Image (cartoon, helix red, strand yellow):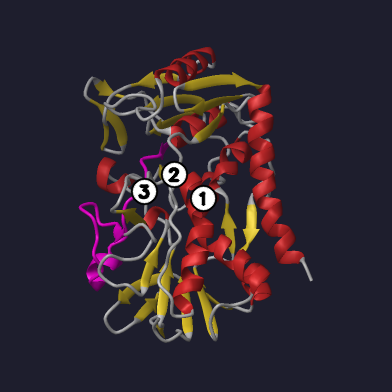
């Protein structure tokens, strides 16, 4: 057993760190001092954003007050982004140039958008990452009628359905999936259901890679019809500062961690969510896995802060449950090879989402 650590720094207010704060509210701080550095006081739950677009939720219905959770847990809150880390010296740097020293640090900052690198740049291009910025920018296009969504994963599919069902101004949506096609990681049964629903809603699907030429979206077979707005749902990219600071990263620049979410190069550094990459197994960058890994991270941080070795391992199930909203009050369920759809699936999704939000709202407001 080593000596207990004094200062634990959480960087980023993501899904896993929300679970850590909840653990500290229930069981007390595992250290003398804890600090949370995050750009936003509120965490926007991305799973409810398509519902907001389609008019099913209010704009801020899917927010978790991370600042209130930190206060309840006895954690100092600092608002600002992380722009650098020196894991040898044991500090991180904020956007304002402040240096924060730590004994142990946990990183849950999320990934960054990849649209400019993959597609190019255009004023009317909106990346869904970071999600708060996306919501703010989308509100500036209330009357956009012709919209292209680039990305054939679950995020792109849900955004396309949501835009097609906007109450105030429904859009004419084109979904550009890329050469891999529609939902390549999900079962053929799910893909068939989604394809039928896209056709039923008159959403055009182009299964080709895309790029920007003179501000317009183009594919191998030619230009996509002129669009008022282009939305990129291309997955997470890695921020530059972890590799620049000397942390071990994978080939894509994500922080390389072991089964305990601990850096393989610096044992007092932990990372979870889209900024991290498990080296012992493949764990997709998905909110589902970030949420499930949170309690394991909380346990490992508690063990390390009292001087013990971490022991808790998040082991994803062989199949994950996905509920894809179709924007019209229905949803498509995916679980391994299984697929189903109906309004009941939409109600199940809403119940799961609201339960997750209310869990932390109740903690934040408890006395």
Residue lying at 59% horizontally and 67% vertically, measured from the top left: 21
Q: Is residue 96 left or right of residue 209?
A: right
Q: Is residue 17 visible?
A: yes
Taking 39 as reference, is 98 above or below it? below
Taking 347 as reference, is 365 above or below it? below
Question: Which residue does the numbered mark 3 point to in the structure image?
Answer: 236
Taking 79 as reference, is 201 above or below it? above
Label 1 – label 3 distance at C-alpha: 18 Å
Give the magenta range. 229-257
Q: Earlier in the sequence, mark 3 or mark 2?
A: 3
* Quadrant assignment for the C terminus: bottom right
Question: Which residue does the numbered mark 2 point to in the structure image?
Answer: 316
Label 3 – label 2 distance at C-alpha: 20 Å
Numbered label attached to residue 263: none
Q: Please say whether residue 132 is one of the residues in the magenta stretch.
A: no
Question: Which residue does the numbered mark 1 point to in the structure image?
Answer: 292
Q: Earlier in the sequence, mark 1 or mark 3?
A: 3
Q: Position of residue 302 (x, y in %)?
A: 51, 72
Q: Position of residue 120 (x, y in %)?
A: 27, 44
**SS of the residue at dot 1?**
helix
In depth, the one of 61 and 109 nearer the eye is: 109
């Amino acid at each position: 057993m080593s000596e207990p650590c004094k200062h634990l720094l959480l960087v980023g207010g993501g899904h896993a760190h929300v679970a850590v704060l909840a653990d500290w509210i229930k069981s007390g701080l595992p250290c003398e001092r804890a600090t949370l550095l995050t750009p936003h006081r509120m965490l926007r739950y991305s799973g409810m954003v398509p519902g907001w677009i389609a008019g099913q939720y209010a704009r801020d219905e899917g927010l978790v007050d991370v600042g209130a959770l930190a206060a309840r847990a006895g954690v100092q809150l600092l608002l600002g982004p992380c722009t650098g880390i020196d894991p040898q010296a044991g500090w991180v740097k904020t956007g304002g140039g402040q240096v924060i020293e730590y004994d142990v640090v946990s990183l849950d900052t999320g990934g960054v958008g990849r649209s400019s690198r993959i597609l190019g740049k255009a004023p009317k291009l909106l990346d869904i990452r970071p999600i708060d910025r996306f919501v703010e920018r989308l509100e500036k296009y209330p009357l956009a009628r012709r919209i292209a969504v680039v990305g054939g994963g679950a995020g792109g599919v849900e955004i396309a359905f949501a835009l097609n069902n906007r109450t105030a101004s429904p859009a004419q949506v084109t979904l550009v999936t890329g050469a891999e096609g529609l939902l390549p990681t999900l079962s053929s049964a799910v893909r068939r259901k989604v394809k039928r629903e896209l056709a039923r809603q008159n959403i055009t699907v182009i299964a080709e890679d895309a790029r920007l030429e003179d501000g317009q979206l183009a594919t191998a077979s030619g230009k996509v019809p002129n669009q008022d707005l282009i939305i990129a749902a291309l997955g997470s990219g890695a921020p530059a500062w972890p590799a620049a600071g000397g942390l071990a990263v994978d080939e894509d620049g994500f922080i390389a961690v072991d089964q305990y979410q601990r850096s393989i190069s610096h044992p007092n550094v932990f990372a979870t969510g889209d900024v991290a990459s498990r080296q012992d197994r493949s764990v997709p960058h998905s909110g589902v896995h970030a949420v499930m890994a949170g309690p394991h991270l909380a346990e490992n941080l508690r063990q390390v802060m009292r001087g013990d070795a971490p022991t808790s391992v998040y082991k994803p199930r062989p199949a994950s449950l996905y509920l894809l909203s179709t924007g019209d009050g229905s949803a498509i369920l995916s679980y391994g090879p299984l697929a189903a759809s109906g309004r009941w699936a939409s109600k199940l999704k809403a119940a799961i989402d609201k339960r997750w939000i209310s869990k932390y709202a109740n903690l934040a407001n408890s006395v």
